[in-house]
């Protein structure tokens, strides 16, 4: 998997890309991350990438020429690059979308800044993605979120690939509660079922706890979850009794 990032702050990515799983994945060659300075594609003494908006208004707008030049120059040497604009107006980044992106070979991530981008830039990207309903100072943080989430699904990045299957959102449910040693901590005990050694019972307990946690914290996710008739009936009964 290859990631290319277009930004006016390339130094923003130095530390996050040099630690933990992302660093190991790059060392193993299963992931590559290239950061491109947008100012290298801007003209003039100051290599300005923004200007005042036509029609007036607050803030500055990113100019189309440098960004399109960068996209075309970078894309020229890539095979089937998928160009993404990080934007609060984009489709939400869900685990399903992450899995879809992980199936591509090359992602080019465009980091916006200032008040926004020139509308014509949207003609030169394949899609827009938002990491949430809030405003950031720029797309750099969002780009790192995309890289981290997608890279984890690339074979060879996570030491135990099966662990990504049972995480929150992998099946539209929140993950079940997890425990480790000691068995008792300040009067709080590990549930007996987890100490039983009965793997079938443990699996059933974890599934039900996942359902309960999702219903309590993110009930909107249940509409997308693949629930059995028995699970639906049990949740309905427990809701009526509570």
Image (cartoon, rainbow, N blue to C red):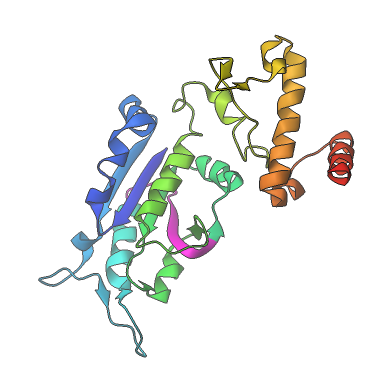
Please give the name of the residue rendered at 88% of the width and 46% of the height, measured from the top-left corner.
240
Instruction: Tell me which segment is drawn in magenta.
Output: 76-90
Q: In the figure, residue 173 lies in which quadrant?
A: top right
Q: Residue furthest left?
A: 45
Q: Nearer the viewer, residue 80 or 139?
A: 139
Q: Position of residue 102 (x, y in %)?
A: 51, 40
Please give the name of the residue rendered at 40% of the width and 70% of the height, measured from the top-left corner.
121
Is residue 99 at all visible to an observer of this figure?
A: yes
Q: Is residue 159 left or right of residue 66?
A: right
The quarter in which the N terminus is drawn is: top left
Q: Nearer the viewer, residue 235 or 128?
A: 235
93 w.r.t. 190: above or below? below
Q: Is residue 97 left or right of residue 83?
A: right
Q: Residue furthest top?
A: 197
- Label count reads 0
Q: Is residue 88 magenta?
A: yes
Q: Main secondary structure of the magenta part?
A: strand
209 w.r.t. 75: above or below? above
């Amino acid at each position: 998997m290859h990631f290319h990032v277009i930004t006016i702050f390339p130094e923003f990515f130095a530390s996050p890309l040099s630690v933990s799983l992302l660093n190991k994945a790059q060392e193993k060659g299963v992931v590559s991350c290239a950061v491109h300075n947008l100012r290298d594609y801007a003209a003039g003494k100051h290599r300005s990438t923004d200007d005042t908006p036509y029609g007036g208004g607050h803030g500055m707008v990113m100019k189309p020429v440098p960004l399109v030049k960068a996209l075309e120059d970078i894309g020229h040497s890539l095979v089937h690059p998928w160009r993404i604009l990080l934007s609060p107006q984009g489709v939400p980044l869900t685990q399903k979308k992450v899995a879809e992106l992980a199936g591509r070979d090359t992602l080019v991530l465009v980091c916006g800044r200032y008040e926004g981008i020139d509308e014509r830039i949207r003609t030169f990207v394949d899609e827009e993605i938002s990491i949430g309903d809030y405003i950031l100072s720029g797309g750099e943080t969002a780009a790192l979120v995309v890289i981290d989430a997608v890279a984890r699904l690339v074979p060879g990045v996570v030491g135990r690939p099966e662990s990504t299957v049972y995480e929150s959102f992998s099946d539209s449910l929140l993950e079940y509660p997890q425990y480790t040693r000691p068995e008792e901590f300040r009067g709080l005990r590990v549930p007996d079922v987890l100490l039983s050694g009965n793997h079938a019972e443990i699996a059933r307990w974890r599934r039900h706890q996942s359902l309960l946690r999702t219903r309590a914290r993110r009930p909107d996710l249940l509409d997308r979850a693949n629930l059995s008739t028995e699970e639906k009936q049990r949740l309905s009964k427990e809701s009526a009794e509570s």
